[in-house]
Image: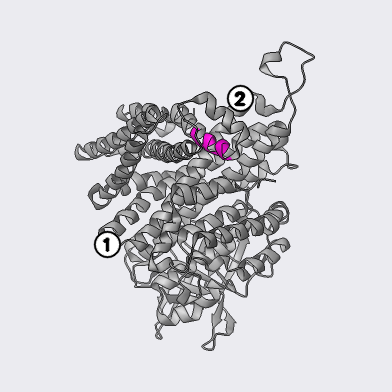
Amino acid sequence: MASLILDERDQKFVLHEMLGIEKLCNHPKFADFSKDMFDMILTEAQKFSTEEIFPTLVEGDREGCKLENGQVHVPKIFHRPYKLYCEGGWSAMSFPQEVGGQGLPHIMRTAAHDWFLHNFAFTAYPGLTEGAAHLVEVYGTEEQKNKYLPKMISGEWSGTMCLTEPGAGTDLGNLSTKAIRQPDGTFKLQGTKLFITSGDNDLVENVIHPVLARIEGDPAGTKGISIFLVPKYLVNKDGSLGKRNDFEIGKIEEKMGIHGSATCLINFGDANNCYAELLGEERQGIKVMFQMMNEARIGVGMQGLTSGSIAYLHALKYSKERLQGSSLLDFKNPEAPRVTIINHPDIRRNLLWMKAHVDGMRALMYFCTFSGDKALTSDNEADAEKWAGIIETLTPICKAYCSDVGFKITEMAMQVYGGYGFCSEYPIEQFMRDEKIASIYEGANGMQALDLVGRKLGMKKGANFMNLLGEMNAMVAKAKTQDGLKDLADDVQAAVNALAEISMFFAKCGKEGKFLVPVGNAYPFLVMMGKVVFGWLLLWQASVAAEKLSGLGINVSDNSKWKDAAKTNKDAAFYVGKIASAKYFIKNVLPEVDAAVKAIKNEDLSILDIPDECFAS
């Protein structure tokens, strides 16, 4: 039976037919790997996800986490898969072999996590640890690497990221946690952090917290912030665990979803003895933490993909089984046989909207990660900078657009189920609850939009954005020459041109002192750009699919033939589905770009002009 977690055929299509990731194996960095090895790893990821992770989803949600005598206890059902996760090396995939990792391309970690992240409450524990370990790998001293990295990479110890404070929220420059310098070069911390994902657990024997704080005497704002490593248990010189550090888990947040994830409030230094080590240079905390934050933002985009994927596949299966109503052709006949709901136009509209957006999310998330691998394996610095810059530009789209789309898909899936989807006997309501947080944490989506408009469009004098447009234009130009795709390519080209036009319009507004226009329209622009990016990627997929259908002797321009072939040939059905996804999106969703352009160019600032008193009487 096909998986209800993700479409493995689509995964292989994106990896091998669209991106051609096996080309990475031609580089010395990845010469020990092969396409067959990649496929074998993903077969194991599917098996592990299906047999170990997915079965913990509902029970982990219902049991949740408990705080007893200062120790967090995660759902009991998480312990076995966590142990197997670590033993299987899933937490070490992309770390260099010299520090205990497997040295795999980052795209392979992304593809494996495409199987795992549907149960984010579970995957958050090893996922946060990977991010924290990467900080130590890049910014730690040799002593810190030797002390912390091996057991973090193996999963024996876990990690977090401690940024948010009760009074500061997203405004990190306003944090109040302070670091007090000690004669031996270490520090003592005092302060409170909240909303700390995986803030504590009983899966491991030690937890390493990267914590943002301000050294006493350093300037206010983000420029005065440093970052520190704060272990739950101090580590002796021989690697054994010493005394318990001076911080306490104040509480576990009661949340709408991801109940199996311990979201903690942590009080550091109540007894004025919270040991901390500086990570990296003083007053470089934001720069250091942004490495982990950007990784996490890509991870949040993956959460949107995996939530959308599992919700769509469950809804698709239900629509093929649920009998209700008669065919439109027989609606006047009370004796007409009942049909499965996939036959009803509105259900089909929902399903195709979901499919097109899941296809777009997977293409985007994989493309971004693959761009990172291309940057690592580029032969020249300019090419490496190009691919790294494209990732920078697309990160807000990955995080914000995919998290919003993922939630929308869970909502549509519930609509397909009807009243049953609203009830807990089906997992749809949990998919929705668990996904909602994705648009809020790691920088709420409105902040992602401001980052996109305020920083990313202008980085390196706009070169990163122009390089992205160049990739889009090249793909569109190719599709214009293919039978059956010129009309779709023309629509995508118009949308790409509109995206470029609005970016220049924003630049013009800035020069004219009308900076509130781009600021006030930042989120609509992000959504607009997300749609253009999806249109480009889906057209790319349609281009590949058209070539494959041609190889099967099927002309894409001959609608009747490819429809007939889809009914008898599984490969043909898949490729026709790719073209259908692209056509639906480009003809039904992409036109919304025109409305966004019109609205933005109106320069209407009602959101700022309306007095506070006028929002309600």
Query: In the picture, residue 142 is in which quadrant?
Result: bottom left
Q: Determine the CA span between mark 2 and mark 1.
A: 51 Å
Residue at the far left: name it: 511
Of helix, strand and loop, which one carries label 1?
A: loop
Question: Does 483 appear above or below 378?
Answer: above
* Residue 428 seen in this snapshot: yes
How would you rate the neighbour count of disc 1 (Cα within 10 Å): few for under 14, some for 14-19, many for 20 or more?
Answer: few
Label 1 amino acid?
Asn
Q: Position of residue 249 (x, y in %)?
A: 60, 66
Q: Position of residue 66 (x, y in %)?
A: 69, 62
- Relative horizontal placement of residue 593, taking residue 317 as reference (left or right): left
Q: Along the polypeptide, which appears first: circle 2 or circle 1?
A: 2
Disc number placed over residue 380 in the picture, else none: 1
User: Mostly what secondary structure, the magenta segment?
Assistant: helix
How would you rate the neighbour count of disc 2 (Cα within 10 Å): few for under 14, some for 14-19, many for 20 or more?
Answer: few
Q: Which residue is mark 2?
A: 346
Query: In the picture, residue 59 is in which quadrant?
Result: bottom right
- Residue shown at 63% from the left, 55% from the top: 46
Span shown in magenta: 571-579
Residue at the far front: name it: 553
